[in-house]
Image (cartoon, grey):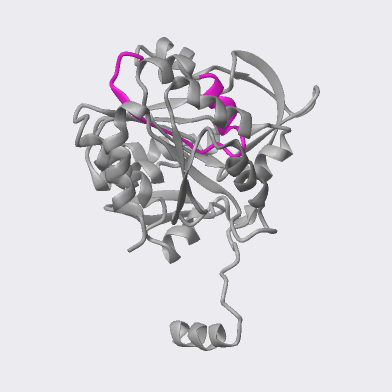
Amino acid sequence: MRKLIRNLLNKVGYDLVKVNVHDDSKAHKISKVKVGNYLIDMPGNNVQISTYKYRPDANNLLGILALCVSKKYPGLTVIDIGANVGDTIAVIKTAIEVPVIGIEGDPVSYKFLERNAGQFQNLTILKQFLGEKKQTMHVELEKSGWNTTLIPSEGKGQELTLLTLDELLEQQKLSTREIKVLKVDCEGFDTIILRGATALLQTQKPVVFFEYNKTNMNAINEDGMSTLLSLEQYGYRSVMYFDNYGRYMLTAPIHNHSLIGELHNYTEDGVSQVGYYDVCLFHENDGELQDAFTKTVRPA
């Protein structure tokens, strides 16, 4: 019936859109959410409850990517930064059983990540916020417990110590792993975190998959485009763009600053048709993997 009503509304230019009903008043409730082959516990205010209910294939790109990369690198490890409660780990491990390092700084999300970790094999979880350098800073935590956003503040909020990804991997003796997929989803901090991963980018040359959210970057005065373009120096030659529903859009040569600038300017949450991008970059040594991945995700 819902589909019939939606089709009728579509004919006259309208649509049904589910609004987020998972507000903070429901944070104490626990929902079991089917994600791939797993049941993931989530706090009741986590918007991913609705996401996976209405879009069970959400985040499937990560599973497709890990499976694709494993064809060339069967011993790979995936890093999942912004692992939240473990839902994206479930997506990856539904597609292929590979070792995953899950990194999450938010204490509520990490508590649920620990809770869900028992059903996974070959999983290392680390509680740590990351940045471009080791530093202690004051931040306001917005959307804590489900989509944590760090807003730097001068002497207000709580004090956090950030590490770089390179430092954390070295500290935990994980830097020698064959890390071939690096996923980052940290609400505007994504490009900041990439600036703290130069050793990893230089030595391991992983496929880089991260959220490019101009709205969130603007909120913390982050110039993400310059960092995106800087990846060319590490051997990344093009940028694959996906919309915020995971649909493939196009691949842009990274040296085409004009096109990448236009894509940057277009996206804006609540204004444009694309609220944010997921972007994916393959090292030039893995051109055949990029071709295979593109064939898999490109619309028929």
**Relative to 257, is 109 on the left or the right?**
left
Q: Is residue 205 above or below residue 222?
A: above
Q: Nearer the viewer, residue 186 or 205?
A: 205
Residue at figure coordinates x 45%, y 36% from the top left: 238
Q: Quadrant of the C terminus?
A: bottom left
Q: Nearer the viewer, residue 197 or 118?
A: 197
Magenta part of the chain: 175-196
Q: How far from the left and from the top, in percent, is residue 59? A: 41, 50
Quarter of the image where one finds residue 74: top left
**Relative to 216, is 243 on the left or the right?**
left
Q: Is residue 179 magenta?
A: yes
Q: Quadrant of the N terminus?
A: bottom left
Residue at figure coordinates x 39%, y 14% from the top left: 172
Residue at figure coordinates x 64%, y 14% from the top left: 135
Q: Is residue 235 above or below residue 242?
A: above
Q: Nearer the viewer, residue 19 or 159?
A: 19
Q: Is residue 29 magenta?
A: no
Q: How far from the left and from the top, in percent, is residue 115? A: 39, 39
**Relative to 156, is 72 on the left or the right?**
left
